Image (cartoon, rainbow, N blue to C red):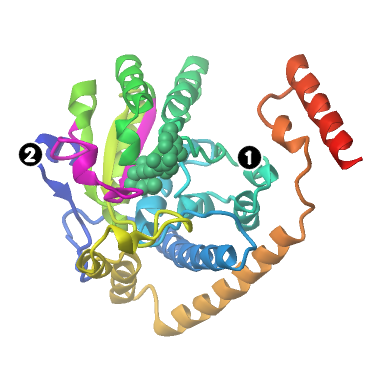
Amino acid sequence: MLIDTYDPLKGRMLQILDPKGNVDKALEPRLDKETLIRAYKTMVLTRAADDKAVRLQRQGRLGAYPPSKGQEASQVGPALTLEKDDWMVWAFRELGALLLRGAPLWKFYLYWMGNEEGSNYGPGINITPSAVPVGSQVPHAVGISFASRYRGDKQVTLCYFGDGATSEGDFHEGLNFAGVFKTPTVFVCQNNQWAISVPRSHQTAAATIAQKAVAYGIPGIQVDGNDILALYAATKEAVDRARRGDGPTLIESYTYRMGDHTTSDDATRYRIGAELKEWSERDPISRFQIYLVSKGLWSAEEEKAWQAEVLRTVEEEVRKAESYPPPTLEDAFKHTYAEMPEDLRREMESLARDLGRKEG
Ligand SMILES: Cc1ncc(C[n+]2csc(CCOP(=O)(O)OP(=O)(O)O)c2C)c(N)n1
Ligand SMILES: [Mg+2]
């Protein structure tokens, strides 16, 4: 078992596919061609869709946006282990995981264009809305998984958060509760080395984030976050454990945020170029591509065709988002409760009256 072998206190990081695309045959997960190609195609689509979002923001067509570049494996690898009915709880930098699980890209754009309707991914897609208040989604994920177990369902909840979120009380409360009640939760910390301009070294004095699991009495493992095979293997084991009733796991996905924190940030003011260069050599997409080509599962022609299709898809999804009706005043009130409570209704009506008076 990988999770037992990679004791987080010993500081060993799981890697199966190295930056040059060499695979560790003893640990290589047995994934069929269809799954591997689906993961790869999603990662390529994620990069293009993400790049487009940044450009849309620069053109004034989308609000502040947190880029995913460099974290595609870290997002897609864990999501690949989920069954259709499982829950996924995310922060705000998980585009690849959303796309893999069937959330429409145009809805994702719509959300970042400021329309709450963008959080409604459609029926049967068990993904919570984005949680921008850092760490706030961790107790939610634990609550969802606790409810699944209480009802006797077999669902597992996968919860993403960043390295910065581990400094929030919500992280502690969530993991502590999960450990005590053995909830079927898999925690994936996307340690991208930065929380806006705060480096990982200032976030915690602990040698790894994975080792924090020890204090909650749960297993933890640090994984190369740019290695899709390692992320898949570790998360699959954790998901299987959770589904069997063996409780939660903390996975530290050791990756890097290649872009700015958001489009409102300028990372060149606090990061050195050498760091960026070093991480660009560990790119998650290129190493996966080398692996697929070497196995005879992907070719230069297929790459060309997919790149072209991705560009068409992205343009089409932007068009859908931009032609959606703009948000209304009610949207700011509508989406918290299934049925709007009376006091909230009064607040909404009062605001509508005030705005009416100002405009009139
Ligand atoms: C409770 C709270 N405090 C501060 C912020 C401002 N803020 C937004 S993202 C962020 C950093 C988050 O870092 P991390 O958890 O590592 O995620 P990353 O942005 O690196 O994906 C901060 C401080 C916030 N959104 N919520
Ligand atoms: Mg971070």
- Residue holding disc 2: 10
Image quadrant containing the N terminus? top left
- Residue holding disc 1: 124
When the figure is inspected, residue 44 is found, relative to residue 241, above or below; the finding is below
When the figure is inspected, residue 113 is found, relative to residue 308, above or below; the finding is above
Residue 108 placed where, x, y %?
Answer: 60, 52
Task: State the residue at coordinates (38%, 22%).
Answer: 183
Whether residue 157 is visible, yes or no, is no
Whether residue 353 is visible, yes or no, is yes
The quarter of the picture where residue 129 lies is: top right
**Mark 1 C-beta to ligand 1 under 8 Å:** no
Residue 84 placed where, x, y %?
Answer: 53, 41
Per the model, the C-alpha gap separating discs 2 and 1 is 41 Å
Query: Dot 2 surroundings within 10 Å: few (below 14), some, or many (20 or more)?
Result: few
When the figure is inspected, residue 235 is found, relative to residue 172, above or below; the finding is below
Provide the secondary structure element on which disc 1 rests.
loop
Residue 230 placed where, x, y %?
Answer: 26, 52
Please tell me which residue lies in front, 159 or 358.
358
